[in-house]
Every structure is written in C-alpha cells, then in structure tokens.
Image: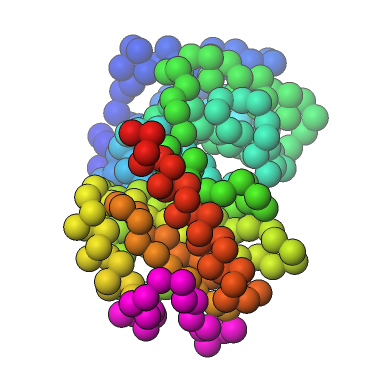
C-alpha cells in the first residue's frame, strides 16, 4: 500500500504545480492516491469521491517559515461532469473567478476546471495565507486543461426562482435523497449511463424541489418512471399531483428520455406548473437536436 500512496509523479503532472507562490515553496515530496487507497488519505469521505468517478489524487504541500502550511489536493475525476458534480455537491456560495466555479470559505479554496476538482487548505488562516491560496489557485488553473462545458442537463432547469447553489448533479443513487427522501433502493435506476439533477427553488415563500433524470433511451426512462409511479402511487393520467404524508404535493412526468418530478409545499397547481416548465424545457431541447 505504501507504493500506492507514494507513487512518483509523471513529468507532465509535476509541471502542474507552481514552485513558489507568495513565499510559500513547494515541498519535494508528493503523494498520489487511487481509488484503492483513497480512504487512507480521506477516511470517511472516500466513497463520496468514488461515486463521482474519481480516478487519481495528487497531494502537495507548500511551506513558508512562520506561516501555516498549505495543502493542495488535485483530484482527477475522469471527466468534466464528474468534476462539476463533486464541486456542486457541497457548494455554498460559488462566484469566485478561479477555474470554472470557485468559492473560498475560512482558509479553504475549492474550484473545478475541466476534469479536475481542486482544494487548497490552510489552517489557521492568516491574511498572508489567504492571498497565497488565491494566487496559487489562479496559477494552477492556468496550468490545467482548458475549461470544459457544464453538463447540458443544467439547461433544462427553469430559471425563475432557481437557487443556483442548491444544484446537485450526480450519477449514483446514493444522492437521490439529498433534499427529499425518495427511497432506500434505486427505484429510478440511476447509474453510470444516466444523469441526474436535484435543485431547490424559491417561489413565493415556498422551497419546491425538482428532480430530473435523463436516460440513454426512452425504454429505460419508461421503466424507471413506472417504478417511481408505483412507489408513490401516482395516477396514470397526466395533470395530477398527489399530496404526500409531509404535506407536500408531488407531481411527476415522463418526457422523451427524461423523468421529472416536483415536490411542492404550496398547492397541487403550483407543483404542476413547475413540472410543466420542466417538460417544456425538455421538449424544446429535443426539437433543437
């Protein structure tokens, strides 16, 4: 296992890391972790990264006398969708202009770009370390592969009232219950061949939740929707929302290769209105293909 955690970096990988930033120098040792031993480095969180397609982690340290050290973790997530997904999984207030999306919270800088997800941590934070973290993040982003497009599924979310920081993108059923409990089992057949979105909205004091799952073909979507309908006793006819035990109204629909669902605490009409907006977005996208 030691050989796995201390694998040497390839020359092109080593070139990604700036040698000096604001007086912090890159330490010579480097750690490389794979899915086989990621738990040794981040015990308790490894499964989260693996569920998003994690391939490899490069961990480096930056040192400056009289200042706390900076730890830089560069996660190769295997694709831009996975990198966006792991960033969005815990986003709170993105908006910092580093990489494609970034945020800074109490000595922690997080961002993603292309297939990579990056964290830079310095604790305790100092005014000097904050400047160093931001500059290091910018320099690293310049050396990474060019930016990639966000998942196209994001374009299907209606704009009105969308809480941008609430968006969660995933391909693993473990995250289907993030905002509402759907099921302990994978009733929607979420997996590597699907794309799933969850998002919250702010509409008139209500906080409806939207779920959208896209499938490789209509048959797969139909099977998933049938199982979802049985779980929640949804009527076969369109235009009906069902009141759940928690008082929220559930409306769901099958449109082409996608299953859409809305949980709304207002009324059945409001749930159906938001669902109709989702379905219109899906139909518009299909027409453009």
Query: In which quadrant of the rendered image does the C terminus lie?
Result: top left
**In magenta segment, residue 234:** yes
Q: Is residue 52 above or below residue 25?
A: below
Viewer-closest of 70 and 272 = 272
Does any portion of residue 208 appear in the rendered image?
Answer: yes
> At x 57% / y 76%, what residue is drawn?
268
Total residue callouts: 0
> At x 75% / y 66%, what residue is drawn?
205
> At x 73% / y 37%, what residue is drawn?
125
Q: Could you tell me residue 127's position as x and y percent?
A: 80, 30
Read off the magenta span: 230-247
**In magenta segment, residue 178:** no
Q: Is residue 107 above or below residue 42?
A: above
Does any portion of residue 57 appear in the rendered image?
Answer: no
Left or right: residue 278 compared with residue 266 = left
Viewer-closest of 197 and 158 = 158
> At x 59% / y 53%, what residue is drawn?
166
Viewer-closest of 215 and 287 = 287
């Amino acid at each position: 296992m030691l050989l796995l955690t201390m694998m040497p970096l390839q020359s092109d990988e080593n070139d990604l890391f700036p040698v000096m930033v604001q007086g912090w120098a890159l330490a010579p040792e480097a750690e490389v972790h794979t899915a086989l031993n990621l738990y040794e480095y981040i015990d308790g969180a490894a499964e989260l990264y693996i569920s998003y397609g994690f391939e490899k982690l490069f961990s480096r340290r930056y040192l400056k006398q009289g200042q706390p050290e900076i730890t830089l973790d560069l996660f190769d997530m295997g694709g831009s969708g996975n990198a966006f997904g792991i960033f969005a999984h815990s986003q709170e207030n993105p908006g910092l202009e580093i990489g494609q999306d970034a945020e800074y919270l109490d000595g922690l800088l997080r961002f993603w770009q292309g297939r990579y997800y990056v964290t830079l941590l310095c604790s305790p934070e100092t005014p000097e370390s904050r400047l160093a973290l931001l500059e290091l993040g910018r320099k690293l982003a310049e050396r990474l592969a060019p930016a990639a497009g966000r998942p196209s599924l994001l374009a299907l979310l209606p704009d009105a009232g969308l809480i941008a920081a609430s968006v969660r993108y995933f391909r693993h059923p473990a995250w289907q219950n993030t905002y509402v409990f759907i099921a302990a089992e994978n009733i929607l057949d979420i997996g590597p061949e699907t794309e799933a979105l969850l998002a919250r909205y702010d509409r008139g004091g209500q906080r409806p939740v939207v779920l959208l799952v896209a499938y490789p073909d209509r048959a797969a979507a139909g099977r998933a929707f049938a199982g979802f309908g049985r779980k929640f006793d949804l009527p076969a006819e369109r235009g009906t929302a069902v009141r759940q035990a928690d008082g929220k109204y559930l409306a769901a629909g099958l449109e082409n290769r996608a299953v859409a669902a809305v949980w709304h605490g207002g009324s059945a009409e409001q749930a159906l209105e938001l669902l109709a907006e989702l379905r219109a977005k899906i139909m518009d996208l299909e027409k453009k293909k």
